Amino acid sequence: MGQEHHHHHHDVLSSEVTAVVSASLFGMIGFLSVVVPIALWNFKFLFWSTHGWSHRAAGGCLLLWLCVGVLQAFQLHLYGNNARSPQQECLIYDTILGILGITTTLTAARDFPHKYVQNAKGQSGSLSQKALVTQGEMVEHSFYQCLNLLQAWYLHFLSSPQSTNANIKAWEPFLALWLVTSPWYLRKLFPINSFSHNWKFTPQHQRTPQETILYRIKKSQYMFYKHVLLHGLNISMALQQSTAVMQEYNHDNRMTATPAWRVYWLALNTSYVMEFFLQTLVRRNVIHNPTMLRLQQWLMTTSSIAAMWILAGRYYYYYGSSSQDDETMSMIHVRPLVCLMSLVLNLVHRHHDVFNVMITAGVFYYWQQQLQ
């Protein structure tokens, strides 16, 4: 009876996830089917020039690779995992995606330095009509591209078969957590462009209300990304891994190979690159600023929908409980209290990300041990 109830519950949740995945997947397909034809129509102009060729080549490959990823996710969503090893396939895909993202950003900073661009105080190149993307903004961006690649590796490591069995040591996930968070030690070596700076310093008459709203949305999206989708998810996964003996609910259905995760990951990476690519299209008079802002809003909405399922925690493992023989269903998800503590520590103890993350993980691990 209990088992039936679990399965029924599981089906209800599955249909919710399917709806979210479908919505965000079609959002991504719709977005790319607007942007890619524009890029192809202006192919010679945008990609076929010797000036800054390395950035053009990297950007072209990245755009193509994102399209491949969306098709892969679409196939996964429609037909399920029929690949022999989706986990490995996704790991290879994510690694290439990460490397292309970093290369595109760094070649942009090298080939189109805009070193002498001093935007009017408070304007950012990615949203303001009159501003250019500065070299500082590009280099800062490469830091987050590196974080993306490391997080992909970290989550693949934690959801790989060898880390889900009983002989994993409790400290291993925490060592991995420390490693994936350690780049924050180097954060101060990269330029920092604060969001609030953008709306505090722009004279009122120079700034459109739409730009201000987009900045505020971007700021809240960034806070959400950092404390829920980055630190929150990483800590929650380490805690999950360190406490339970997990028996896979479905051999081929580990988190990083689920359609929901694939779509979220593609939306995040597309948002990163499109912020700059759409601005380039405006500067080159390929599209107009209102179109660019509409496309940005479209992408923001799609990314937000794609991120929703992570909050909902609709991802299953069977949990073998030591006291009973029957298996009870458990969800892997971001723990709200973990995110809250991460956020609070960030506000009271700024610029100490690694310390804050490890303290949060330690407190919750101790609390978990007490409850067992």
Image (cartoon, rainbow, N blue to C red):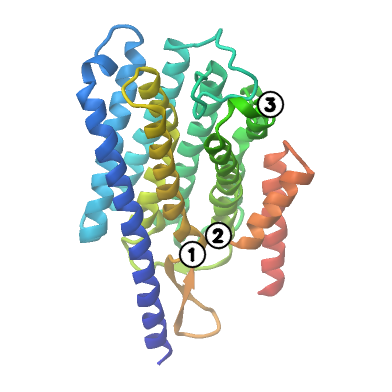
Q: From the viewer's perspective, is 55 left or right of 229?
A: left
Identify the residue position indicated by label 3 in the image: 201
The image quadrant of residue 200 is top right
Name the amino acid, label 1: Gly
Compare marks 1 and 3 and give the one earlier in the sequence. 3
As drawn, the residue found furthest toward the bottom would be 1
The image quadrant of residue 13 is bottom left
Residue 135 is at least partly visible in this image: yes
Q: What is the C-alpha distance between the residues marked 1 and 2?
A: 7 Å
Name the amino acid, label 2: Val
Identify the residue position indicated by label 2 in the image: 334
350 lies above or below 316:
above
Q: Which residue is drawn at 43% across and 42% down?
A: 297
Q: How crowded is mark 3: few (under 14 residues within 10 Å), some or many (20 or more)?
A: few
Residue closest to the eye, 160 or 191: 191
Identify the residue position indicated by label 1 in the image: 313
Name the amino acid, label 3: Phe
Q: Residue at x 32, y 12 (%)?
A: 53
Q: What is the C-alpha distance between the residues marked 1 and 3?
A: 39 Å
Compare marks 1 and 2 and give the one earlier in the sequence. 1
Q: Where is residue 51 in the image (x, y as percent from the top left)?
A: 33, 7
Q: In which quarter of the image is the C terminus?
A: bottom right
